[in-house]
Image (cartoon, rainbow, N blue to C red):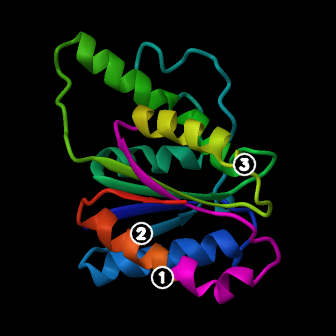
Amino acid sequence: MTDVLAFLGSPRKGGNSEELLMAMLRGVEAAGGLAELIRLCDLRIEPCLSCGGCDHTGKCVIEDDMGLLYEKIIKTDRIILASPIFFYGVTAQAKAFIDRTQALWNRKKLLKEKGEWQNQPGRNGFFISVAATHGSRVFEGAVLTMKYAFDAMDMHYAGDLLVRGIDKRGEMKRADRDLAAAEEAGKNFFLNRKSHVD
């Protein structure tokens, strides 16, 4: 059984965000956890149509690869999402995934209305992001998006690892301090300790 579900939102395979995420997953495994990595760019996830189809059922009407992810999200207690910063936000691949979690938010709402919702404390989400610039506010939009995304998935925003000034392919491999921080964050995340690195 998977302990941590990790979503990679970068369209660039083998890039800096993936390198940082893999370091965090090494930390998860070092702490005794089992992680599953899902590359969103390998899946066909259509954008949300805002059709209202999930308003009354809690289920998305679009038939694509997102349908494979809903049960995984519901069943796991730990989710990591990694995305580089594109125009002060997450990537299009990550945003399409996030927008489609509207169905999970509606599922929770409907179950609460029926008195069938069961709170599950200890469900945590963690955000990893890499930005090419050093701007003081470069992560603000993405962090806010992720806080609401994890809420839709019934997850507590448990922390983040935000790295500035990394751009060219391969740079992260030489960022020893950031990679070590990612491994430590992975251990803490799996063991349910508070993590925040910026």
Q: Residue drawn at (23%, 66%), measured in percent from left and top?
A: 191
Q: Name the residue under label 2.
A: 36
Q: How far apart are marks 3 and 2 (CA)?
A: 28 Å
Mark 1 or 3, nearer chain start: 3
Label 1: few (<14), some (14–19) or many (≥20) C-alpha neighbours in 10 Å: some
Snapshot quadrant of residue 35: bottom left
Q: Mark 1 points at which residue?
A: 180
The answer to whether residue 174 is left or right of residue 147 is right
Q: Height in image: 4 above or below 144?
A: below
Q: Height in image: 109 above or below 36?
A: above
Residue 178 appears in the picture as rendered:
yes
Q: Where are the magenta residues, as a range?
A: 153-179
Residues at discs 1 and 3 in contact (Cβ within 8 Å): no
Label 2: few (<14), some (14–19) or many (≥20) C-alpha neighbours in 10 Å: few
Mark 2 or 1, nearer chain start: 2
Mark 3 or 2, nearer chain start: 2
The x and y percentages for residue 58 are 41, 24
Q: Distance between the residues labelled 1 and 3?
A: 22 Å
Residues at discs 2 and 1 in contact (Cβ within 8 Å): no
Q: Tell me the kind of residue under disc 3.
A: Val
Q: Name the residue under label 3.
A: 138
Tell which residue pokes out farthest to the front in this image: 136
Magenta stretch encompasses residue 166: yes
The x and y percentages for residue 195 are 38, 59
